[in-house]
Image (cartoon, grey):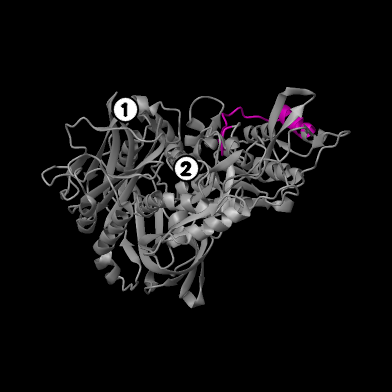
Amino acid sequence: MGLKRREFLQQAGRVLAAIGISEAGWLRLGSRYLEALAQPTARKLALLVGVDQYSESPLHGCVTDVELQRELLVYRFGFAPSDILTLTDARATRENIETAFVTHLREQAKPGDVVVFHFSGCGSRVSFGDSPAKMQNSLVPANDVVPLLENRSVNDILEETVLQLVRSLATENAIAILDTSYSYPGFLKNGNFRIRSRPRPTIGQPSLAELTFAEGLQSGKNNGSVIAVLAAAANSQIAGEQEWNGFTAGLFTYALTQSLWLATPASSFSVSFSRAAGTVEQMAGLSQQPQIRRDNLTTAPALNFATSLMLNSAAADGAVTAVEDGGKTVQLWLGGLSAGVLECCEGSVFAVDSSVKSIDSDSLEDSSYTSRLLLRSRTGLSAKAQILDKLDRTKGQLTAGDLVREEIRVLPRNIGLTVALDSGLERIERVDATSAFATVPQVSAVGSEQPADFRFGRVPETIVAQTPAAYEPALYQGRYGLFSVGQMPIPDTQGDGGEAVKVAVQRLIPQLKALQAGKLLRLTVNETSSRLKVRAVLATLAPQARVMVQRESVRASGDYRLEPLSAETEKLSNLGILSLPIGSRIQYRLYNESDRQVYAAVFSSDTAGRLLAMNYQAESDVGAMSRAIAPGDNLSVPAAGALGLAVSGALGLAETLIIVSESPFDRTLAAIAAEMQQTRDTLPVMLLNPLNVARAVLEDLHAASIPGVQKLGISTDDLALDVNVWATLSFVYRVV
């Protein structure tokens, strides 16, 4: 049955209000959205630029960034492939980039059209004259030149030139995305991250050709619109790229494209951007914080851009790119999956939802048929899958462009932890570390350049928290510890000076197990794929009572009764991770809006890897893990009326996972009880053997999923988790 236009606007209005957009703001954005919908002839144009092949120090993920953006725009936002122009490596010269912007974007874009410009590559800064105060950000093209004493000209594109080009467009629905950084910190890599800035001091000046081109823009047409630029980092920070299992991509581009694959038509762009910024901050810490840079202090340009993009489909994890073998197999692009799930996804089942959606003045119609795919192999972000069931021939064949979403998530039972050995270690230290890690079950050591979960190396004599320059190998002394892949120290892992490498590794075993437990639990996060209709909020009770963050299972159907954020929260300018001062008192509230009873297990972890069970309490407690939550009922942790949980622990990121299942957590409760001492009735409970508990959680979800897995006829020795029976919602905040 069609959804009436009035009902559609009411529901979307409630959702936007819940995520921080006022009614007046919704009316403005909704008006622009409907105007765009009423113009089916409006074009969507994109120019995507990626440069890996620099002569001085090549990058490896910029061309992948272009692929990520292109697939996103085609399959999620309805861009015609012919309207997307890509310039990569040798083709991405200064002249080609600027010419393409003029001919492909400025000369074609009309009022109401949508325009996207994306650049991935090195950035730098150039000087004007001899004054160091007159500096401008610049983008480094493929035909970069080294300045000479007699000729200091470089071939860079001024960032201001890009902004002038965007301002000159005939449409206001335009945005620039820059995955680059401008300041060279003096080293090429920060842990596992390769830095996207030109590796030499800033001594160059813009070329005469660039200045002439920019001057022509200033004297030409300018519509005066407010510009939004999505930047991978602040001007003084570094932007990095990372190698995952099978591909390399920019931290920001990968996080942003994942977030937008999973957005819904009613989503606020600020929410999608905040998720992406939070993902980057979890990986890189405060050394890279994505920004929305704009001409004023509002996010209106980015929000307007998002509504004009007009999502043409429901949230998805990827898309069918080709049908092969006479309709027996398909090629998939899985840009919406997180890197952790992507690495484990072989054997998983995806549902294909070939939906035909149309929005007119009276209704929102959705007619679809579904087929299921069994993933057989994966290379980077591409995968090959077998079609499990026969398609309904009356409704058409499976075709390229059909979207896919998770149905059964398959996880190996032997998921371990990978530790990269820092390049600053001596050869004998690396040999000893490799030998020592080999004795730790499910923990493996790899080279400094390889993908890893954490890094092992010498501890700087003086640690300046969150400052990448503090981690240069020259500063390392005879102490060992663990670091994030972004080279941030893991608290409580630094040993005393003079210890042997093998002794250090043995000392770290308890924390390695705790960090592995956290990794396993994070692999259950599925708020974007779960079909279980639940939602949760993180609220502060003191020093002020307010709802701070909301999470819900995106794909569960229906109209949520979402709680609006406080007015103070709406005004927060930080679009990254929420910060909570030590001593604040917080509470989690879970709402069961499904048609079945559910159970909840709530776990929290900090940067040191400590894992806490937040609702393991006496059976009589209404918030206990063993208590069933009836349809329409809710759960508060701690219980309603309590003073709340005090924010404490190590400074840095903390994460709480609310894991909801149709079935009781019998194995989890038994695993916790087996290690309990005299702290049974305290809240929260510090887990003494967190790895056993994490494995028990996965086994409980696997047991709850057996009926759905058997229904599909899937047989596997691995853990198979049915997205219809569980939901894991993640709350990440920074303890300050």
Name the kind of residue labelled 2 in the image: Gly
| Mark 1 → mark 2, Cα distance in angstroms | 29 Å
Identify the image quadrant of the C terminus: top left
Tag 1: residue type?
Gly
For residue 706: magenta?
A: no
Q: x, y (%) of residue 500?
A: 51, 50
Mark 2 lies on residue: 495
Asked if residue 420 is positioned above or below residue 240 in the image, the reply reads below
Q: Disc 1 marks which residue?
A: 583
**Residue furthest toward the left?**
620
Span colored in magenta: 211-234
Query: On the picture, is 701 further left or further right than 43?
Result: left
Sequence-wise, the earlier of marks 1 and 2 is 2
* Residue 402 visible in the displayed image: no
**CA neighbours of label 2 inside 10 A, class few (<14), some (14 to 19), many (20+):** some
Q: Position of residue 6 (x, y in %)?
A: 31, 40
